Amino acid sequence: MAKGRRRRLKPVKLWKELPILFGVALLLALVIKTFFVQAYFIPSQSMQHTIEPGDRVLVNKLTPWFGWTPQRGQIVVFKDPGGWLDPSEIKKDNAFVGGIKKTFAFVGLLPEGNEQDLIKRVAGVPGDVVQCKGVGQPVTVNGVPLDEHTYLYRGIDGQLDDASQTPFGPITVQPHTVFVLGDHRSDSGDSRVHLQEPSQGLVPYSDMQGHAFVRIWPLPRIGGLGTPSTFSLKNPAQAMQSTATAPPLTQVPAASRLAGDYTNELLNIMQSYQGGAALSATSSCRLKMSAVGPRTGRPRYGYL
């Protein structure tokens, strides 16, 4: 009985293999950017010094798929609720360059040309009453003053930014919305600027992209973006008791903060996505937002 001929496996030529590898890489980038983690580029001063212009942060986009809701003190990325950005400030490219950018933006390798995302810190969640009586006065949540000295902007002279340059509130945060503030209060176009609008400056859950949990660039500034302890209280009675008994806040080494934030983030992801594996993303997205001047309260910049 004759033996059948054995065929040798021929290696795939490189020029044939590259398109396949490139296609798989683009597909993975698209899935990661859409469902898991995305990197964002921060071009403005509104969150100084927590986030400096030029910093890049990672945003958890997985947990919103499993019922996550914004919490007090978290730094969140959200789409423009409407009218927060000045369309005239958005840079427009020619057709050729715009086409290339749109292609790469679709798979997450570049920010979209019309991307209009903002980044702020959550100050109030549904049911909270947020208020500030003006210069020299703290922001209060449910009547309890926030201790913001650890993250509010400090000028080159060391002077701490006022919690708000103008009085506002009391504002009751409506269901499925949040009240947001920038850490650089004198240079941030946040909920305070839009109080006269029908939304009262509140950002709906439906506009949320996710919450930023770590700085990844530049290397000297790598560190976690945790929630300040002043936001950890659940009701006014707890807040009053803690304010009277809590010791002064201390600085935690950057490495320890980063390790703790990564651990907490991974636990949150594992709890919300049983059996799933957390993936990282290499895409970046420019956050375009308006900023307000310290005197006029009107939009001054095209980016925030």
Image (cartoon, grey):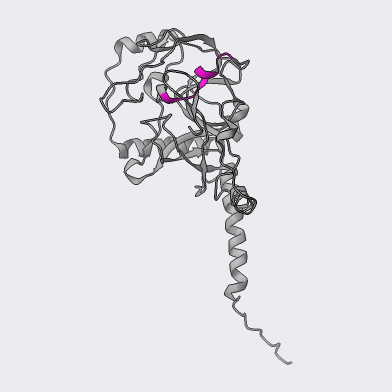
Q: Where is residue 191 in the image (x, y as percent from the top left)?
A: 52, 20
Decide which of 300, 139 is in the foreground and name it.
Answer: 300
Decide which of 124, 110 is in the foreground and name it.
Answer: 110
Decide which of 184, 242 is in the foreground and name it.
Answer: 184
Q: Where is residue 195 in the image (x, y as percent from the top left)?
A: 55, 15
Residue visible at 35% across and 11% down in the picture: 136
In the rendered image of this protein, does residue 206 appear above or below residue 99? above
Q: Position of residue 177 (x, y in %)?
A: 58, 20
Residue visible at 38% across and 30% down in the picture: 48
| Image: magenta residue range | 187-196
Q: Is residue 102 magenta?
A: no
Q: Is residue 189 magenta?
A: yes
Determine whether, in the image, residue 2 is placed left or right of residue 287. right
Residue farthest along the bottom direction in this orientation: 2
In the rendered image of this protein, does residue 153 appear above or below residue 13? above
Q: Where is residue 46 in the image (x, y as percent from the top left)?
A: 43, 29
Decide which of 294, 26 is in the foreground and name it.
Answer: 294
